[in-house]
Image (cartoon, rainbow, N blue to C red):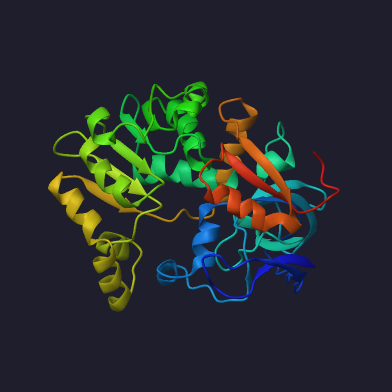
Amino acid sequence: MKAMVLRRFGKDEPLRLQEWPEPVLGATDVLVDIHAASVNPLDFKIRAGGAIRLALPYRAPLVLGNDFAGVVAAIGAKVTRFKPGDEVYGRPSKERSGTFAERIAIPEHELAHKPRTITLQEAAGLPLAGLTAWQALTEELRLKPKQRILIHAGAGGVGSLAIQLAKHLGAYVGTTASEPNHELVHSLGADFAVDYRKFPIEKVFEDYDCVLDTIGGDTLLRSFQTLKPGGGIVASVSGLPDRSYAKRTHQNALKTLLFTLAGRRFAKAAKARQAEYRFFFMHPSGEQLQHLAGLVDRGVLRPLVDRVYPLSEANEALAYVQTGRARGKVIVQVSSSSPQ
């Protein structure tokens, strides 16, 4: 099969279209013809190598791509919930990642039937970002009705979904977005939006119960100052793991030490505010994806697609996402015969 392959790690290392071994179908696996995949910041973090390899030990050469939508081609002997011809979508575990390719074999429990009311292209943009948003709000932040949440980058892939889900959960939503995107984030349900390039977030967001950070760095550090005094939680997918993350994920002594050193700035900022810092990686879940599909079909949640690139132009898709200008998700069209 054809795939876009990363031959070695490097920040600007290009992917190359080449032949790649066919996936092996296990007894509990589903073989899917991939019609579309989406670009996620995780893709260029993996490509760059560096610190992320402490938590996600990938080896080159490998195929990038971390979510997809497609059609079931075959099923393993023990699969019960899917049949050939089903339209599905999923976020494979790190051991099975590689969706910039024509096919994937994915465990049944990581897969879901795609939402009926959207296309395969639109569905491809939902798994990783949707699971990240849902797990951040319900598992990490434990968001409750009437709480105040700050969601960074509200026009982005995760942020645009998180705004909608937070409103569905009954929260008051503040968000950061460039001024041209304010109309968009308000249409998604944001109650308050600020251009992060014009105003320091700690000056305009006050007494929030929690923050979902997708940016990291200085933005993450200043996010603690937006919390209500004496409490609050900041959950981040773009910061660095710390000692609490190492304990929650049962890391060995060496990784615990490395994570403690890596995340000490954020742990210190949390302690100064008497707050909680929760770095996290989302985990695959077919059950949660099926729940999200129901929200889409009920009109509660709508994925946004900014641009679509053919598989051979995956490098251009990555470059566009890295500009930070994408509104919603950028899609890589794998199959030229994909239903629209």
Which of the pair 6/23 is nearer the observer? 6
**Rendered image quadrant of residue 19:** bottom right
Determine whether 145 is above or below 213 in the image. Answer: above
Q: Residue 194: x and y, percent?
A: 37, 28
Residue 178 % position (x, y) = 44, 32
The residue at the point 41 percent across, 52 percent down is: 237
Q: Position of residue 46 (x, y in %)?
A: 52, 65
Q: Would you say residue 165 is visible in this rendering?
A: yes
Picture residue at 37% right of the left edge, 36% below the top: 197
- Extreme residue in the front direction: 198
Indicate the position of residue 114 as horizontal and vertical percent values.
Answer: 68, 42
Q: Residue at x 80, y 68 (%)?
A: 1
From the viewer's perspective, tell me whether residue 78 is left or right of residue 208. right
**Where's the C terminus, which quadrant?**
top right
The reply to whether residue 171 is in sight is: no
In the image, 292: left or right of 223? Answer: right
Asked which quadrant contains residue 305, the reply is: top right
Task: Out of 220 and 243, give the one closest to the viewer.
Answer: 220
263 relative position to 249: left or right: left
Q: Is residue 161 above or below residue 188?
A: below
